[in-house]
Amino acid sequence: MKKVKRLSQKIEAVVFDWAGTTVDYGCLAPMNVFVEIFKEKGIVVTSEEVRGPMGMDKWDHIYELCQLDSVKGQWQEKYRKYPEKEDIDELYTRFEPILFSTLRSFAKPIEGAMDVVNILRKQGIKIGSTSGYTKEMLDIVAEEAEKFGYKPDARITSEKVGKGRPFPYMCYANAIQLDIDGMHKMIKVGDTLSDIKEGINAGMWSVGVILGSSLHGFSETEVKRLNQADLLASMEAARTKFYQAGAHFVIDSIKEVPELIEEINKLLQQNIFPHRYTTVRKDMKPWEASTIQ
């Protein structure tokens, strides 16, 4: 009887987000613009409110902000109505040129990102990417990031697949382009809750990264100025939000990705796949405790 060759069970690709994960520490480029376009309309949105929908397509992001009670209340008081589609279109029309004028200044890889990518490439692991940016926006960021040596094997935006996060289609497109034969052999690493949901919906290992992330909400300079107690408290708050969104793992820094891959490979060798995995205690590192649902 002919033996059937068993397909290897190990991670073959990592799909990274861009701003806040591999480039633009703190995801500052889009955040500043969201605040500005609402300010021009006489509406105040806080940084925390802006960061809530971060990672979504930008029109969708503006739509979500316009559904906030605080925004609807201000809009009603100022314009005697709630924001409508034409208002969102107008905000987005203003959003694009401001963002385009600043994108090149926010494309530098986050510390440790290039080291991680180089380690993964040496291990034969492919590098994919998804983004909440449009293709035109991401083309600018990618061109600038490549000057620093960062060039993923795949670069997918929602225009290619029809829908952005939290839908899984950009991840599926990565799998096709990278020639991966199972979504469980891929890890999605991102800095927003929509990244986490995207990875989960795609059947991938979904990983949140804290430092540099939009969810953590601090610039690199601000992090260096925080005292240790405040930094740890803010990191734990972000960690909790990631896990509440369904993240399989949460890491402090992108530098931990290679170590995490080793641990996920051990799980895969035991036929433990993403949909069957949960952590015992959410404050533990992933390699400190695991179980099967």
Image (spheres, rainbow, N blue to C red):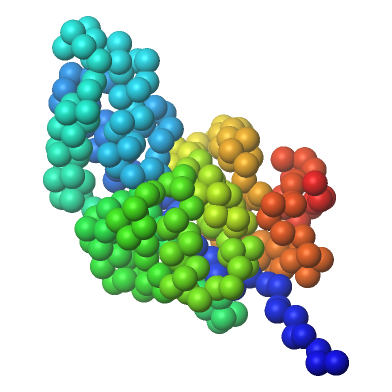
In this view, the residue farthest toward the bottom is 2
Residue in the image at 54% along x and 65% along y: 14
81 relative to 160 in the view: left or right: left
Where residue 135 appears, as percent x and y from the top left, is 26, 58
Residue sitting nearer the eye, 80 or 124: 80
Residue in the image at 30% along x and 56% along y: 159
230 relative to 279 in the view: left or right: left
235 relative to 46 in the view: left or right: right
The answer to whether residue 263 is visible is no
In this view, the residue farthest toward the right is 1
Q: In this view, does 292 lie above or below 260?
A: above
Residue sitting nearer the eye, 255 or 50: 50
Residue in the image at 33% along x and 27% along y: 65
Disc tally is: 0
Q: In this view, does 214 lie above or below 264?
A: above
Where residue 27 appears, as percent x and y from the top left, is 37, 46
Residue sitting nearer the eye, 63 or 36: 63
Where residue 130 appears, as percent x and y from the top left, is 41, 58
Where residue 5 appears, as percent x and y from the top left, is 75, 85
Which image quarter is the N terminus in?
Answer: bottom right
The image quadrant of residue 180 is bottom right
In this view, the residue farthest toward the front is 1
Residue in the image at 50% along x and 68% along y: 175
Q: Is residue 6 above or below residue 53?
A: below
The answer to whether residue 149 is visible is yes
